[in-house]
Amino acid sequence: MQRSFGWLRRTRGCLLLWCVIFPAFIRGEKLPVSALQEDFRIARSALEEAHGGIYRYTSKAEMDRTFDGAYRKIDRPMIDLELWRLMAPAVAQIKCGHTFLWFPKALQAQFETTIPLCPLEVRVFGSRAYVYQDLSRTGGDLEGSELLSLNGVPMKRLLTQLEGVFTGDGNTAVKAWRIGHIGGFTVYLYGLGVEAPFLVTYPARDGKRRTAELAGMKLVDRRKAWDARNPRPETTNADLKFLNDGKTAVLTIRHWYQYADEERKLTFLDFLKNSFSQMRTNGSKSLIIDVRDNDGGLDAPGKQLFAFLWDRPFYYDEKLVINARQFDFFKYDPEAKPIRADIVEQQPDGRFRLGKHPNVGVQQPAEPHFAGKVYVLMNGGSFSTSCEFLATLHFHKRGIFIGEEPAGGYYGCTAGRFVQLELPNSKLILRFGLTTYYQAVSGYKRDRGVLPDFPVTHTIVDLISGRDRDMDLALSLVQRPDVSRGNGQKAPARH
């Protein structure tokens, strides 16, 4: 079952390929209070009935208070955008990185041709926003500068508002990454009411505070500008290269798909077999696995990779559970279908367990086995299947973790089969998974992802210069045979 951000294909640092996530609002007619309340009740009921992880990180009492408080604010006629501003933070309080409140499809289409978006690619470091690229022009004072305000709104206030609608799983520290990479300064900025033209305040290179007015860009033009400045050299979902005369292997996994190549000729499992055979032939002693910006995909590939790194039978997922085989709210999603009866078993509590899932039960190691040291690069873009793999590797003490905390929780997620409810009045779209995953791990923080043994702090200067501090650090650690997995160890001196 494909999950995570399969619906959102990004180049690194840019989201712009599935416009379904992009809110496109036109000043339309206001909906009556009764219609708005009906949509809210439908969304809340669906989440409470079917989201198996709704209380995983937030108690029922707290979620009830959150929903009740937002509902009370529906006290006047509103347009769809105003309802989104009330509902999106409430949905985000579930703290499920797979669960989103989207924008009406009819409005999304307007972005391609009519609605100018902010042309700045922005990255957030240390609670501050910096301009990575100005897609309306190359160079100039803006790139590399800190954003102080937009349209007169202090950046600190805008970041606080954006943090209210962005979440990973639990209390993973990934809001900054997600704001910068998943539309925070394009569509969500528009959703908060910051529209073209954009008056930007920033400190210029001479230290003086400057302002600039930007006209904004249509989505199609913004995408073209991004692609022109950021060509994608890689075309595969996974690849392998060797360093240090073959003694160090670097395995990059960009997506967890059935195939490793775009031509769909080489399965991921065959790619792994070939890769580990090459490592054995080369006598590789160290393996660097890079899952940065890998937002997930299919369930099985993560388990398949771990099997080459472990030499004994193991457990991967403890269980996968859904609350029911079908729900009344399926009528709001034309693609929703009942879960097949032959793949689930009803439990005493009334819920259903997916008993035939390939990741459940005893798993066997794979050959050729790799017994050398494993170093893992991860960041806020590592999610879903990536986090299952990371947690399993961490639980079995099989890797040294470098970079940033990933977006997924240690013990699993709620994803699997997704529903997309189109609320009947506002046409807002609620998307969430029906399957709750419980991994076969224990003894770790309940509400966090795998924390790095060697955290890496990034800067806008690093990003613009193209310096890869994560990889630099990994390569330096490879040369230190005494390094073992720590607990938030300080990295060696900056490289």
Image (cartoon, rainbow, N blue to C red):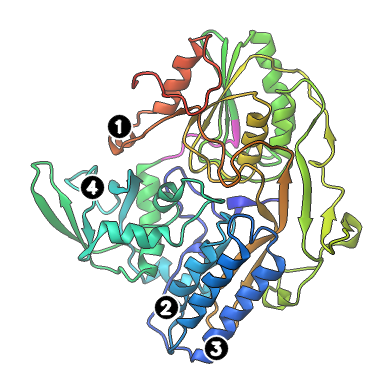
Is label 2 in contact with label 4 (beta carbons under 8 Å)?
A: no
- Where is mark 4, residue-wise? 146
Q: Earlier in the sequence, mark 2 or mark 1?
A: 2
- Where is mark 3, residue-wise? 35
Q: Residue at x 46, y 74 (%)?
A: 86
Q: In the image as oriented, which residue stretches furthest toward the front? A: 61
Q: Secondary structure at mark 4?
A: loop
Question: How many labels were placed on the picture?
Answer: 4
Q: Is residue 236 magenta?
A: yes
Q: Which numbered dot is residue 107? A: none
Badge 2 amino acid: Glu
Q: In the image as oriented, which residue stretches furthest toward the right? A: 342
How far apart marks 2 and 4 lie (CA) works out to: 29 Å
The crowding category of the residue bearing disc 4, from other C-alpha atoms within 10 Å (few below 14, some 14 to 19, many at least 20), is many
The crowding category of the residue bearing disc 1, from other C-alpha atoms within 10 Å (few below 14, some 14 to 19, many at least 20), is few
Q: Main secondary structure of the magenta part?
A: loop
- Name the foreground residue: 270 vs 208: 208
Q: Earlier in the sequence, mark 2 or mark 4?
A: 2
How far apart marks 1 and 3 lie (CA) works out to: 51 Å
Q: Residue at x 55, y 51 (%)?
A: 170
Q: Which numbered dot is residue 465? A: 1
Is label 2 in contact with label 1 (beta carbons under 8 Å)?
A: no
- Displayed quadrant of residue 30: bottom left
* Residue 41 location (% of width, % of height): 61, 80
| Quadrant in which the C terminus is drawn | top left
